[in-house]
């Protein structure tokens, strides 16, 4: 006769085995998918075309997913735990008729981003939620691009490009920069702040990018803010210092740390 204690232990072991099997299958699928994406990118690069491909993975862990691949501010993914992947989007509490400022105190200078909650309410709400929890404090801006696109990407607490809040938010205000041209892109003017994503709709998390020079991108990134003049100058100075190792895409040579982030209603 199997005791109730033994039965509980058996069920726990079976549950653990199922979890491991699911995770292993997920890892195999991601590996296959990334191999295909890498092959596609190689072909596109070899042909000299503009690269608008991205790794289609989700921003899904509490402090774990959003990097960039190719010439887009995209975000590859972590392997979140079951608990982390179920984090809900924060309840909408911002005033949807108001404007907000996100102030980033960084070692490279202060950057203030004006945000309009009437246009991007859920994006503004998410940033206020995260800033109030000090989510960005002490995080590094992990990616600078100086060729083809001109952005500084931030918002990953891990500083690796694989960090996210464990939930995603929908795209908003995608038509704000006009209709896409024949090349499928629109101009993101210098000073624009927009959400990074995985290349798939509704996959924004915590990572965002600061445009320091007019940049052409597909209109698939939520533009939610505008940098003030002093902040734009600070970002441009970081860009002028270049990328580590002299590449056109990678960690900024002049490291940027967000020491403190606050979001306040105007």
Image (cartoon, grey):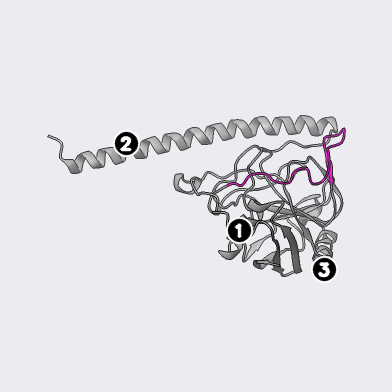
Give the label on residue 230, or none: 3
Dot placed on the residue nearer the N-terminal end, 3 or 1: 1
- State the separation of the CA atoms marked 3 and 2: 58 Å
**Residue 241, position as x, y percentages in the image:** 83, 61
Residue at 79% across, 31% down:
44
Residue 33 vertical position relative to residue 62 in the rendered view, above or below: above
Dot placed on the residue nearer the N-terminal end, 3 or 2: 2
**Residue 39, position as x, y percentages in the image:** 71, 30
SS for callout 3: helix
Give the label on residue 157, or none: 1
Residue topped by disc 2: 14
**Residue 155, position as x, y percentages in the image:** 65, 56
Q: Quadrant of residue 216?
A: top right
Q: Is residue 12 left or right of residue 218?
A: left
- State the separation of the CA atoms marked 3 and 1: 24 Å
Dot placed on the residue nearer the N-terminal end, 1 or 2: 2
Provide the residue span drawn in magenta: 168-187
Q: Quadrant of residue 96?
A: bottom right
Residue 226 vertical position relative to residue 217 in the rendered view, above or below: below
Q: Is residue 213 left or right of residue 25?
A: right
Task: Decide whether residue 175 is among the magenta residues.
Answer: yes
SS for callout 1: loop
Give the label on residue 31, or none: none
């Amino acid at each position: 006769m199997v005791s109730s204690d033994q039965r509980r232990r058996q069920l726990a072991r079976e549950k653990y085995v199922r979890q491991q099997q699911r995770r292993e299958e997920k890892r195999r699928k991601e590996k296959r998918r990334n191999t295909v994406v890498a092959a596609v990118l190689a072909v596109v690069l070899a042909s000299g075309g503009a690269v608008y491909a991205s790794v289609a993975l989700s921003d899904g862990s509490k402090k774990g997913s959003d990097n960039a691949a190719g010439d887009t501010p995209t975000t590859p993914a972590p392997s979140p735990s079951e608990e982390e992947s179920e984090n809900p989007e924060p309840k909408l509490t911002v005033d949807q008729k108001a404007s907000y400022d996100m102030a980033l105190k960084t070692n490279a200078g202060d950057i203030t981003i004006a945000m309009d909650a009437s246009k991007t309410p859920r994006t503004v709400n998410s940033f206020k939620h995260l800033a109030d929890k000090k989510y960005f404090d002490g995080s590094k801006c992990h990616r600078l691009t100086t060729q083809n696109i001109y952005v500084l990407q931030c918002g990953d607490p891990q500083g690796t490009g694989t960090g996210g809040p464990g939930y995603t938010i929908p795209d908003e205000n995608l038509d704000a920069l006009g209709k896409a041209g024949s090349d499928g892109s629109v101009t993101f003017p210098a000073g624009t702040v927009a959400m990074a994503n995985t290349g798939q709709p509704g996959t924004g998390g915590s990572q965002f990018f600061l445009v320091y020079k007019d940049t052409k991108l597909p209109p698939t990134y939520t533009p939610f803010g505008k940098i003030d003049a002093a902040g734009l100058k600070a970002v441009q100075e970081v860009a002028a210092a270049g990328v580590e190792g002299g590449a056109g895409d990678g960690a900024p040579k002049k490291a940027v740390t967000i020491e403190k982030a606050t979001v306040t209603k105007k």
